[in-house]
Amino acid sequence: MKTRLIYILLFFILINKSIAGDVPIIVISAGKAPQSKSTIGSDVSIIDSNDIANSNEYFVGDILSENLMGMNYFQSGGYGTTSGIQLRGQPKRYSTVYINGIKLSDPSTPSNDYYFGNLMNNSFESIEVLKGSQSTLYGSGAMAGTINLFTKKGREGHNKTFDISEGSFGTRNLNAAFDGILDNFDYFVNITNFSSDGISARVDDDENDRYRNDNYEGNFGYQINNNLRFETYLNYADTFLEYDSVSLSQTDDSSTDDEQALFSSKFIIDNGNLKNTFSYNKTYILRETMNYNTTPKNKMYEGARDAINLIGQYNINLDTRIVYGLEYEVDTAEIFSNYPGNTGVYGNVGYIEKEEEINSQYADLQFRPTEKIHSTIGVRRDNHSIAGDYHTARATMAYKLESDLTLRSSIGTGLRFPSLNEYYFGSSVVDSSTLKPEESTSFDIGFDKNYPDKNLDFSTTFFRIEYENYIGAPKGNEDSGNTYVNKNTNFTNHSHGYEFSSNWKPSKDIMVNLGYIKTFSYDGSTCDNGDDYCDNSMNVRVPSYVLTSAVSKILRNNLSGKIKFKYVGERRDYGGSDNNFRQVMLDEFMTVDLSANYQVDEYKMNFSLKNLFDEDYQENLNYSTPGRNLNFRVNRKF
């Protein structure tokens, strides 16, 4: 597969020629530079400010689940509980998440991935989801895709927005935002207080698990002159969650008190054809858990990331430009380890601290080989302080067959370096250098078709991802009797399938949306052929198919309503001590949601009734999901 990729890259280079033309610009992140969506070969989905404003969801994960096909969002209980995004039928550790360019993964987690449970939606202007391998531009972990979130900025004048929400399970959300522009200075400040009595995360009791989220953030910019700009973003979140243990037989009196701090400072030099952005990004996450079933009862998990980046863009002409970058990243983690032989930095307490460094360089050539074709070719080098040097590459093409029909395709390689937990904390790895990065090859092809006279458009994508060197401790991977030693397995895991989405506006006041995804995936790490270790070979918690449909109607000039259907197929899940660790198939389910928006002068009211028929289902084995619930929100702008 990699040989074929090299030939395709050479083909793109040989046919390159420049043809000038006007291209409408839509700011997206597929190439880390402004591009028109119709000229991008990658599969890109955008959730804009209207989608976010009209949603009655509190959290980003729920907005993604509501608006996007080609992904699965699961949660282990109510608000704030462990959750994750799965793109292209792959585990969540193969997708990366950014806010204003700040990578959000937590180096202290087992896989150095990101849990969406605490990420609220109040401050975001847009969300962009890139599917398929994005490692060439976004580095380690972006094997299945990348999610970019962009916060709001100051608008003309001085504006105030207040938001109050009340809902089922004792849920309340208070939000205040202030933004504006003063001469060359622009600002956006957002304050959120969210609280909920919650539901019981596990199915064996009726004790509610409380959740609280206090969030403070600011986005500030200063235009020094026409060519120079300075930007700073800050975010601090303090959250508290009561959660249930993973075994039905244990007591459910655990909690976690978490802090997250994000900081970004950017200096932008824009000289027309040449633009360079220098940035320093900081991610800090501290988790303090209280679990009466462990020793010690209180444990601290501390993860931090410091990154210095350069992103450059040189426009050769109207059709050709080079995007390039330099990145230096240091990840550190301090974790309590139960394994003997790990030397604790605090004596015999069991805490150890480790770090890793990654130096990266990348270049992405974006060009127009013919009048109807837009292409990109990208290469990247990552040097990991433990794993060493690795390279990734990507090529994309968007071919405009007709004015309303575009064929697009992308092919690329990806990688994920082992996490600090996998190197040092999660098991007794005798020699960390023996762990190799997980590597992948991704391919997709699809087309976008529009029928302007019928107000109809649809999009279809076929995809395939293969990855090897899976890191884990599956059955048959014992080392001197210890089944918890992380190793690279010899399995080649893969997923393939197709996605379909369509939007139809039969009249000026009705909109119909339809989406379907069918996924075939194989998890060789736990599903050997002929082995009864699991009931199905699918990756854990990935549905075999998902069907969604929504109908929106403008009832009056200031009143609109929406009904949404979602049907989710069977999923495989891990078993536990409750069923002798046998894996199971979770039942398919269907939910129906209602929502309405009503505008009166400066007041906007949102109403939603979720899970209308009170469907009883599980996204994770033995973990509850909310039944029928009601939410009401009032928004006031000044």
Image (cartoon, rainbow, N blue to C red):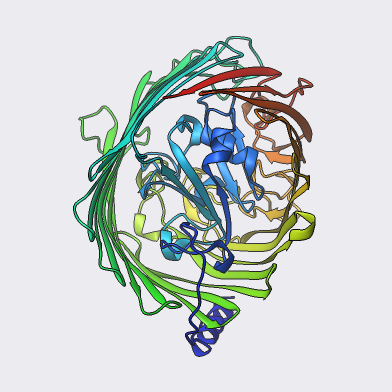
Q: Is residue 131 above or below residue 71?
A: below
Screen quadrant of the N terminus: bottom right
In the rendered view, does 172 fall on the left or right side of 216?
right
For image coordinates 53% across by 62% down, the residue present is 133
Q: Is residue 541 above or below residue 347?
A: below
Q: Nearer the viewer, residue 83 or 491?
A: 83
Percent of width and height locating residue 516: 75, 49
Task: Please tell me whether residue 524 is drawn above or below residue 232 in the rendered image.
Answer: below
Question: Does residue 388 lie above or below 198 as drawn?
Answer: below
Which is more toward the observer, 604 or 91?
A: 604
The image quadrant that residue 379 belongs to is bottom left
Q: Which residue sits at x=33%, y=35%?
A: 157
Percent coordinates x, y for residue 574 in the rendering = 64, 37
Q: Residue furthest bottom?
A: 14
Drawn side of residue 497 relative to residue 123, left or right: right
Relative to the observer, which residue lies in front, 583 or 279? Answer: 279
> Residue 146 appears at what percent x and percent y?
49, 53
The residue depicted at 69 percent of the width and 36 percent of the height is 582
Count up the numbered dots: 0
- Indicate the quadrant where residue 601 lies: top right
- In the drawing, does residue 623 fall left or right of residue 176? right
Inspect this view and state whether residue 335 appears.
no
How far from the left and from the top, in percent, is residue 290?
Answer: 40, 18
| One can see residue 198 in this view | yes
Toward which corner of the image does residue 207 lie, by quadrant? top right
Q: Quadrant of the C terminus?
A: top left
